[in-house]
Amino acid sequence: MKKISVLAAIFLATAVFGQKISDYKYILVPETFNDFVKNSYEMDRSLIKALKSKGYTVFQEGKDPWPSEVDQRSCGYIVANILNKSSFLRNKVELEFRDCNKKVIFSSTGNSNLKEYKEGYQDALKLSLASVPVSKPVENLQVTKAESPNVQPVKKTEEPLAEPVSENKSGKYSNGKLNLQKIQVDAGQFILADSGSSVPFAVFKTSSKKDVFRVKLADGSYTIGYFEHGNIVIDMPQSNGDLTKEVFSSK
């Protein structure tokens, strides 16, 4: 698959002063990141490798043994996390570190124009890691774990599950000129295909906004698509740089 070259890379880093990440020696990386449960794009491996190169002792939940010198109930370690902040046509992640009180002590954002998911997220993570300082652990670091208030649990009323949306189903669509088949590849991807062609007319991948997709067309160009009143709409790029609305109605 042809890779889209980097046009620009925007980097933003924000440190929360007072308690510093460099004061710590140990960092826990979760087994999965909440924003990347289905696919981490190997960012956990890249994160662990980069943090170790900066002098931190890193261990991953569920995969590595807990260091004998670290009490799981203590405040002698911090927890890393990667948040998905992507927009329609740009991959963006926020790297954050929290202490035992779940307070963010450091966060850094990486923003990449690489369109492919794995390459784009890896590039964004690399940018966010640039501002992470080298570990200079403080002996006998004084961090007090806040006591949790004794609150009685509130019972929630069970609500019936909503029916799955019809957009997840395969079907036939037409714009009056082309008759295309919608094929659901997985939960985050589907294609519109012409039975007479071996190349999909369009490949749709989920974005951070519900029912809005990043679309790769048969000619290799990228645009956006979305559902509207049960129809599939694609913003088709024109030679003059404009976009035209192409509507494919369900048959």
Image (cartoon, rainbow, N blue to C red):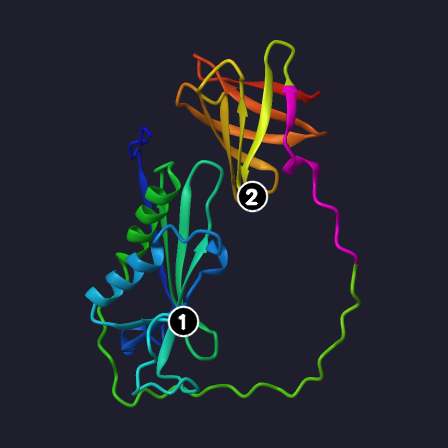
Vertically, is 164 above or below 216?
below
Q: Which residue is label 2 attached to? A: 187
Q: Secondary structure at mark 1?
A: loop
The disc, 1 or 2, on the residue closer to the chain's N-terminal end is 1
Vertically, is 102 above or below 234?
below
Q: Residue furthest top?
A: 177
Pick the front one: 130 or 183: 183
Q: Which residue is label 1 attached to? A: 62
Pick the front one: 174 or 199: 199
**Tag 1: amino acid:** Gly
Please state the extent of the stretch shown in magenta in the rendering.
160-173
Give the class, few, some or many, for how many residues have Cα within 10 Å of label 1's Cα (few <14, many ≥20): few
Task: Report which quarter residue 45 is drawn in.
Answer: bottom left
Q: Secondary structure at mark 2?
A: loop
Question: Where is residue 208 drawn, in percent x and y?
Answer: 53, 44
Question: Where is residue 62 drawn, in percent x and y?
Answer: 40, 71
What residue appears at the point 79 percent right and 60 percent down from the top-left corner? 159
What residue appears at the point 53 percent right and 17 percent down from the top-left corner? 194
